[in-house]
Structures are given as structure tokens and as C-alpha cells.
Image (tube, grey):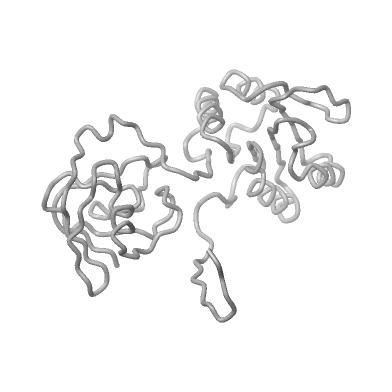
């Protein structure tokens, strides 16, 4: 955790799909607390570069005093009054006449639906969600009920959400792992992914997000059976024998996986 002069630091290029690429001219940004950080970057790019895009920010904090980037958000509202609409919601409600559109309490599914109805976005608008799991679940379910598709919903995930039922057919297994020119015999304990087990064993596999959103830890299954657990979206870009070891668990005792 300490860096000295002369140390080398390995970095990776930006990756992921939590970015605006194209759309219908309208975007809704849903965030809580520090989740505003990537959302504000998206908002500034859209407002500065894409003059035909309208941006709606729905942003939650405990109260006015804890609102991150509040002054910056106000500046953007003043500079883009026709294209930047902001709705604040506070979990510790205190009326503030200087914040129009203040919403009381946490955003649940019912409240998210009311916000969608009030904003009335284009049916092909894109939605970006960054915050705790509860917010993402509530907003995603509300958007689905209002007819928005998975292709229109983007979420910034910081951890894998695992359902205990997914592990009912998982057992501790010994597998073979090929990484570069080296080959390892690796025990994968039930409940741990191949990546976690490799790192515990001192095998420095490449990885980044650890949530199944990037492809840094992608491996090729040469034999045996395995499954990925906790993915928040389908990875249609992966071939049938390609797995992300950050969320991959062996199903058989003859698993042999290769990491490029």
C-alpha cells in the first residue's frame, strides 16, 4: 500500500460499457451519494459535446449538506436550463426552498415509476444507474415495468451479487490452470471463484472489475464443466468455451482452463 520513488505501477486502459455511445436525444442518470462521480462525467460530456441530448439527473443523498458536487450541479443547471433537469431526493428529509423538485425518502420501485411518469422520457431513452444494490434493483424493475429494455439500461456494478441457490450444484474441486507458459494444480473451494482461489494461491492472474463486466480475466475452458455466477447481464460477446474466471466456478473434477 506504499509507493516509493522509482517504483513501477501497472495500469490498464479505460474499459467497460458505462458510457454514452448513441441514443435518441434523452438520457436519465440515476445515482446515490458517491455514485454521482461517473454520472456527472457523463452529464458534462453530453451537455458539452452532444447539443441535441437532454439530460435528466435523479440524485439521492442523506440531506442537502451531504450532496456531493452540489455547486457544480447548480452551475450546470444555470448554464443548460433547457437541457439539464435535476431531481434531488433526500433520505433525511428537510425542506429546502432552494432545491425545486426535492423528493422525500429513498427511491423504491413505486417512487421510481412516479419519477418516470413525471419526467416522461422518450421511450428509447437510455438510463444510467450508479449506487447501492437497492437503488439499482428498484430502478431497473420500474424501468422494465414502463417498457424499457435491457439494452437501454446501464448500471455501474462494484460487486457480484450471488444467490446461494446458484451454489447448490457446486463442490470444492481441484482443477488445472494454464497461465502463460506455466501450469498449476489449483484447489477451488466451494463459494470461491477460480480467480479468488488463484490469487489466494499466489498466482497473479490478470483481472480488473471482478464483476464480470470487463474481459481482463477471460479464460478458455479446455476440458470439464464450469459455470459463471453473479453476472448482471448476458455476455453475448463470449464464445461458448470462454469464461470470466472472476465469476467462474468448476462443476466437475476435470476442469482445465487456460488464461492467455
Counting labels gives 0
Describe residue 28's horizontal placement relative to residue 18 as left or right. right
Q: Residue at x 88, y 25 (%)?
A: 97
Q: As displayed, is residue 60 above or below residue 25? A: above
Instruction: Locate residue 25: give its quadrant.
Output: top right
Return the x and y of residue 253 as percentages of the image width and height. Answer: 12, 49
Where's the C terminus, which quadrant? bottom left
Which of the pair 110/62 is nearer the observer? 62
Q: Residue furthest top?
A: 110
Q: Which residue is drawn at 50% across and 45% down?
A: 158
User: Foreground: 134 or 128?
Assistant: 134
- What residue lies at 17% left-to-right and 60% top-to-bottom? 176
Q: In this view, does 191 lie above or below 119?
A: below
Percent of width and height locating residue 211:
42, 47
Residue 108 coordinates in the image, percent (x, y): 58, 22
Taking depth in this image into account, of 49 and 226 the one nearest to the observer is: 226
Q: Is residue 219 above or below residue 149?
A: below
The extreme left residue here reads 254
Residue appearing at x 64%, y 36% in the figure: 32
On the image, which quarter does residue 125 sit in? top right
**At which x and y percent is residue 5?**
59, 79
Q: Is residue 15 left or right of residue 166?
A: right
Question: In the displayed structure, does residue 182 sit left or right of residue 54?
Answer: left
Q: Is residue 145 above or below residue 55?
A: above
Amino acid at each position: 500500500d506504499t509507493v516509493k520513488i522509482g517504483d513501477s505501477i501497472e495500469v490498464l486502459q479505460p474499459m467497460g460499457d458505462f458510457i454514452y455511445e448513441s441514443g435518441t436525444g434523452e438520457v436519465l442518470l440515476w445515482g446515490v451519494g458517491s455514485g454521482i462521480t461517473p454520472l456527472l462525467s457523463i452529464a458534462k460530456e453530453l451537455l458539452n459535446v452532444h447539443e441535441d441530448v437532454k439530460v435528466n439527473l435523479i440524485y439521492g443523498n442523506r440531506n442537502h449538506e451531504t450532496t456531493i458536487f452540489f455547486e457544480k450541479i447548480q452551475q450546470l443547471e444555470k448554464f443548460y436550463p433547457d437541457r439539464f433537469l435535476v431531481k434531488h431526493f433526500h433520505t433525511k428529509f428537510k425542506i429546502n426552498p432552494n432545491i425545486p423538485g426535492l423528493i422525500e425518502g429513498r427511491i423504491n420501485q413505486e417512487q421510481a415509476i412516479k419519477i418516470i411518469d413525471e419526467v416522461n422520457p422518450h421511450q428509447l431513452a437510455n438510463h444510467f444507474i450508479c449506487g447501492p444494490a437497492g437503488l439499482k434493483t428498484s430502478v431497473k424493475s420500474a424501468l422494465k415495468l414502463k417498457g424499457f429494455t435491457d439494452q437501454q439500461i446501464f448500471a455501474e456494478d462494484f460487486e457480484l451479487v450471488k444467490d446461494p441457490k446458484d451454489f447448490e450444484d457446486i463442490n470444492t474441486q481441484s482443477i488445472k490452470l494454464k497461465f502463460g507458459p506455466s501450469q498449476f494444480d489449483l484447489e477451488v473451494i466451494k463459494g470461491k471463484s477460480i480467480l479468488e482461489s488463484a490469487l489466494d494461491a499466489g498466482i497473479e492472474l490478470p483481472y480488473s472489475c471482478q464483476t464480470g463486466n470487463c474481459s481482463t480475466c477471460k479464460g478458455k475452458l479446455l476440458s470439464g464443466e464450469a459455470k459463471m455466477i453473479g453476472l448482471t447481464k448476458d455476455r453475448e460477446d463470449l464464445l461458448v468455451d470462454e469464461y470470466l474466471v472472476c465469476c467462474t466456478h468448476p462443476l466437475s473434477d476435470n476442469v482445465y482452463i487456460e488464461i492467455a
